[in-house]
Each structure stands twice: as C-alpha cells, then as structure tokens.
C-alpha cells in the first residue's frame, strides 16, 4: 500500500515538473519564389511578393520531414522579365530563410507552446 502511494507520488511529481528544453536544428537556406503569371507590371510584381510566404514555407518543407520555416531573414530581390507585349513575369530571387526542425531525441511534443515552453 505504501509502495503504491510512494510510486504514485513520484509519478505525480515527475508529471508536474517542468519539461526539459526542446532542442532545435536550424539551417540557413537561399531559395527563389516561383514566377508570377504573365500580367501587367504592377500586378506581376504584387503577385510575386504575395508568393513569398508560401514559397518560403515550401522551400523549408522540401528539406524533409519535420522542417518548417522559422523566419524570412531577407526577402530577396524582385526580378521581372517581359513575356509578351506590355506584360511581365516577376519572381523574387535569393530569399534568405531560416529553417528548423526538432533535434532527434529531444522532448518533442512537450516543447510545443500549448504543452510546455517554446524557445
């Protein structure tokens, strides 16, 4: 009986103790966004800039399982080329991204902000 109480108290204390820090692996990545459609110059540049969040997330995910975009360090440069008379295609080139994933063997779910601390 006392053994059950003691083991229950230890288990309860372990569950209430703060989780150890979650370790992350970070890497820098340079990528370019996809080209916009063939549009008038203003619309093409706007469409190219709007693609940056999606294409930067996809670039990090293409590294493999668990990789995600931490932040866009630099949005890169906008480059436009004519595709037909009065129309252009634009693309954001050389975006500097910081991608990260959980370090194998780290805490994992305990590091998610809802469940524990997030660094």
Image: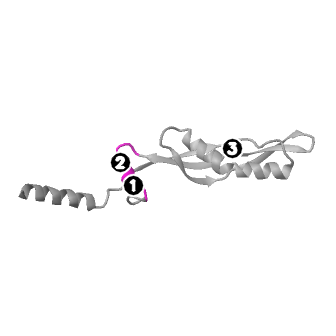
Regarding residue 61, the answer to whether it shows in the image is: yes
At x 82% / y 51%, what residue is drawn? 43
At x 67% / y 43%, what residue is drawn? 32
State which quadrant residue 62 falls in: top right
Main secondary-structure element of the magenta-colored stretch: loop
**Between discs 1 and 2, the one toward the N terminus:** 2
Which span of residues is magenta-colored? 103-113
The residue labelled by disc 3 is 33
* CA distance separating discs 2 and 3: 32 Å
Foreground: 41 or 95? 41
**Between discs 1 and 3, the one toward the N terminus:** 3
The residue labelled by disc 1 is 111
Where disc 3 sits, the SS reads loop
Foreground: 77 or 84? 84
State which quadrant residue 2 falls in: bottom left
Foreground: 21 or 29? 21
The residue labelled by disc 2 is 106
In what quadrant of the picture does the N terminus appear? Answer: bottom left
- Dot 3 alpha-carbon crowd within 10 angstroms: few under 14, some 14 to 19, many 20 or more: many
User: Mark 1 against mark 2, which lies toward the viewer?
Assistant: 1
Give the left or right position of residue 57, taking residue 102 as reference: right
* CA distance separating discs 1 and 3: 31 Å
- Circle number at residue 32: none
Give the left or right position of residue 98, taking residue 48 as reference: left
**Between discs 2 and 3, the one toward the N terminus:** 3
Q: Are marks 1 and 2 in contact (CB under 8 Å)?
A: yes
């Amino acid at each position: 009986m006392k053994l059950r109480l003691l083991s229950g108290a230890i288990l309860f204390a372990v569950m209430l103790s703060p989780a150890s820090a979650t370790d992350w692996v970070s890497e820098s990545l340079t990528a370019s966004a996809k080209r916009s459609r063939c549009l008038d110059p203003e619309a093409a540049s706007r469409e190219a800039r709007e693609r940056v969040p999606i294409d930067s997330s996809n670039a990090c995910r293409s590294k493999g399982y668990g990789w995600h975009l931490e932040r866009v360090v630099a949005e890169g440069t906008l480059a436009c080329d004519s595709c037909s008379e009065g129309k252009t295609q634009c693309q954001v080139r050389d975006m500097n991204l910081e991608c990260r994933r959980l370090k194998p063997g780290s805490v994992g779910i305990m590091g998610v902000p809802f469940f524990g601390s997030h660094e």
